[in-house]
Amino acid sequence: MIWHTVVSQPFALGESPFWQASGGVLYGVDVAGKQLWRTMPGSGYMDRWDMPAEPGCIAPARSGGALDGWIVVLRDRICRATHWGGTLHDIARLPIDPATERGNDGRCDAQGRFWVGTIHEPASGPRQPVAALYCIDGLTGTTTVRKVQDGVSNANGLAWSPDRRTMYWADTPSHTIKKFACDVSGYPQGEGEVFMRFDAKPEGWTPGEPGYGGRPDGAAVDVEGNYWCAMYEGGRVLQISPQGRILASHYTPALCPTMPCFGGSDGRTLYVTSARHGRSRDELAQLPLSGCVFAMRVGVAGLPTQPWREIGHGF
């Protein structure tokens, strides 16, 4: 299977892609570029929307039974927009210090709740395990924010199994993906257990050298329950069985893939975003497509994108 380039104008840090079947549109964010973007693969259409702060993630929104704009995380703000390029309305805030922490990876569950993990970004010194996972719930008519898990420094890899009884969540710097047993609504219970743990980066390793397989970034799940994970600095997307066995390793045209998603008319097109922000000049010369969005056909469909659901709004 071969990757092809969907978006050839690179993003600084492409993330949070999702496929919206109505219209056949692929959405995502450029974190470092402070933009949202959307494209219709194969059409040449590309639209970017400047943001006032780094967008960590985006998801479609549903209100009154119909798709109704998007929900976006901007550092510590949870925002709603009903028109592309329109007004961003704050609906909640994450209880974090935006000077040292921001919203990062996130997605909606089958109930329509928006789950957002954060990342610790100190001005100096190493990241600390002070980041967390929050559940933003608008189903009661009043948007609530609840901390659900903590103890990580860079939350990533959030996804649920097809039956919603398992939640996956990764801490990128620790090279660890955990899985959590969930109640019938998909809400995680307990502290979870290690699903996958990868070898740490060898001391003195430099990009382009062998000996390092990368660390887990964003992820998606297919209809058979396999977990597809982008391996940052590993230049690959892994397909992992629910039992924790690596089924396939798909090498990408960028060293730093960031997050996969499934789309296309049959759900069997795998899209993956990538990064070029902070990468060396030598690496970018060797991998000039870094930061682009890639796609390939795969043998299994992915789970459909779930929208945020809310009870009314005054926008």
Image (spheres, rainbow, N blue to C red):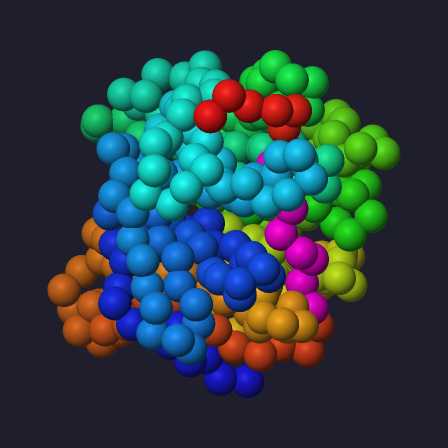
Residue span colored magenta: 301-309
Residue 93 can be seen, yes or no: yes
Look at 69% across and 68% down and name the residue there. 301
- Residue sticking out furthest to the bottom: 1
41 relative to 167 in the view: left or right: left
From this view, report whether residue 208 is shown above or below residue 11. below
Look at 62% across and 77% down and name the residue there. 298
Residue 178 can be seen, yes or no: no
Look at 25% across and 43% down and name the residue there. 50
- Residue sticking out furthest to the right: 184
Q: Quadrant of residue 142?
A: top right
Count all numbered tags in the image, as a single digit.
Answer: 0
From this view, report whether residue 298 is shown above or below residue 111. below
From this view, report whether residue 19 is shown above or below residue 248. above
Residue 291 locus on image (x, y percent): 30, 62
Look at 49% across and 62% down and name the residue there. 25
From this view, report whether residue 77 is shown above or below residue 272. above
Residue 44 locus on image (x, y percent): 34, 74
104 vs 233, nearest the viewer: 104
| Quadrant where the image shows the N terminus | bottom right
98 relative to 80 in the view: left or right: left
- From the image, give the main secondary structure of the stretch colored magenta: loop
Q: Is 307 inside the magenta-drawn segment?
A: yes
Q: Is 177 inside the magenta-drawn segment?
A: no
Q: Quadrant of residue 167?
A: top right
Residue 58 locus on image (x, y percent): 46, 42
Residue 182 locus on image (x, y percent): 79, 34
